Amino acid sequence: MIISASYRTDIPAFYGDWFRRRLEAGFVRVPNPYNAAQVSTLPLTPDAVDGFVFWTRNVIPFLPVLDEVAARGFPFLVHHTILGYPRAIDRAVVAPERAVDALHAVRARFGPRVAVWRYDPVLFTSLTPPAWHAETFARLAEALAGATDECVVSIAQVYRKTARNMDRAAAAHGFGWHDPDDAEKRAVLEGLAAPARSHGLALALCGQPHLRDLALSAAGVGEAACVDAARLSDVAGRPLKALGRPHRKTCACAASRDIGGYDTCPHGCAYCYAVRSPDIARARHKAHDPAADRL
C-alpha cells in the first residue's frame, strides 16, 4: 500500500517527531474520521509499504525525518503547497521564499522526481483576483524551475467548513470572496499554463474533470494523479506492483491509506476544508502526544 501523510493535516510541519517514532515502532493506529471507535492498525514496514506521499506547507522541519525515511529504503513524494497568499488568507504558513528554497533542497537531497509543487487551492477574492494569480504564479514558477517538473493546481471547492472559515476571515480582514462560474475558473487555469510550460513544469488539474475542456487540454493542462504510483516507481528505481484506485471517482490517484486526523493543523488557512475551527486545531495540536500510537 501507499501511505498518505497526510491530506487531513500537515504532518511534516507539525508532527514530524510523532511520525519518526511511528516509523521506528513499525506501525500506526488510525481512527476512522467519522467513527472514532473504529481504529485500524497499519504496518509501516518495507514489506508492507510501497511508498509515502507527504503533503505539507512547510517541509523544513521534516528534512531530517526524510533522511531517515530514505535510509530505511522507502520511496516517497513531497507535495508542497506554495501560494504566496496574503496573511489575511494564509495566517501562519512559511514565507514563499523559504518554501521555494526548501523544495530546491528536497530535489538536491533526494532526486529530481521527489518534489511536486502545489498551487492549490486557487481562491477568488478581492485580495487575489485573476491578475494577482497570473503574476504570482509566474513568479513562483520561475523561482521553482529546476526544483520540480510538475505543478498540481485546483480551484477551491467550497465545502461548508470552507465557506464558514472564509466568511470568518473575510469579516475579520475586510476582503470579499466568491465562487465564480466555470468559465472564469477555466480562464484563470488557462493563464497558468504558459508560464508553467516555459519553466519546465507539467501543469495538472487535481480532481476537477468538469473543468478540463478542449481549450484547457490544448493549453497543456493535464489530469493530476497526486498519489502517483508511476512517479513513486521512478523514485524507487523499480516498478511498484499494481495498485487499486481510490474511492473518489473524479481522482486519477492510486489507492492510499491516510494516517492523519482532521482538526489538528494549526496553520489557520482561511480556506481549509480539514479544520472546523482554528481554535480547535490549535488546542488539539497543543495537547498532542508525540509518543502516542495515533495522531
Image: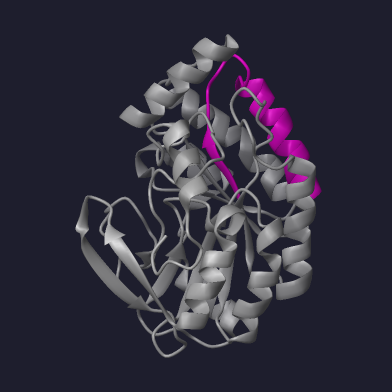
Residue at the farthest bottom position: 47
Location of the N terminus by quadrant is: bottom left
Residue at x 59% of width, y 26% of height: 89
Q: Position of residue 237 (x, y in %)?
A: 59, 86
The correct choice, above or below, for 294 with respect to 141 in the image is below
Nearest the camera: 143 or 43? 43
The correct choice, above or below, for 80 with respect to 193 in the image is below
Display colour scheme: one colour
Q: Position of residue 55 (x, y in %)?
A: 53, 56
Q: Position of residue 189 (x, y in %)?
A: 55, 35
Residue at x 64% of width, y 72% of height: 66
- Residue range in magenta is 118-143
User: Is residue 133 covered in magenta?
Assistant: yes
The correct choice, above or below, for 109 with respect to 80 in the image is below
Residue 156 appears anywhere in the view: no
Q: Number of marks in the image?
A: 0
Quarter where residue 294 is shown? bottom left
Quarter where residue 15 is shown? bottom right
User: Is residue 206 covered in magenta?
Assistant: no
Residue at x 39% of width, y 62% of height: 253
Location of the C terminus by quadrant is: bottom left
The correct choice, above or below, for 163 with respect to 37 in the image is above
Nearest the camera: 24 or 7? 24
Q: Is residue 32 left or right of residue 227?
A: left
Q: Is residue 247 left or right of residue 203?
A: left
Q: Is residue 171 left or right of residue 66?
A: left
Nearest the camera: 50 or 141? 50
Nearest the camera: 141 or 175? 175
Q: Position of residue 159 (x, y in %)?
A: 34, 31
Residue 163 appears anywhere in the view: yes
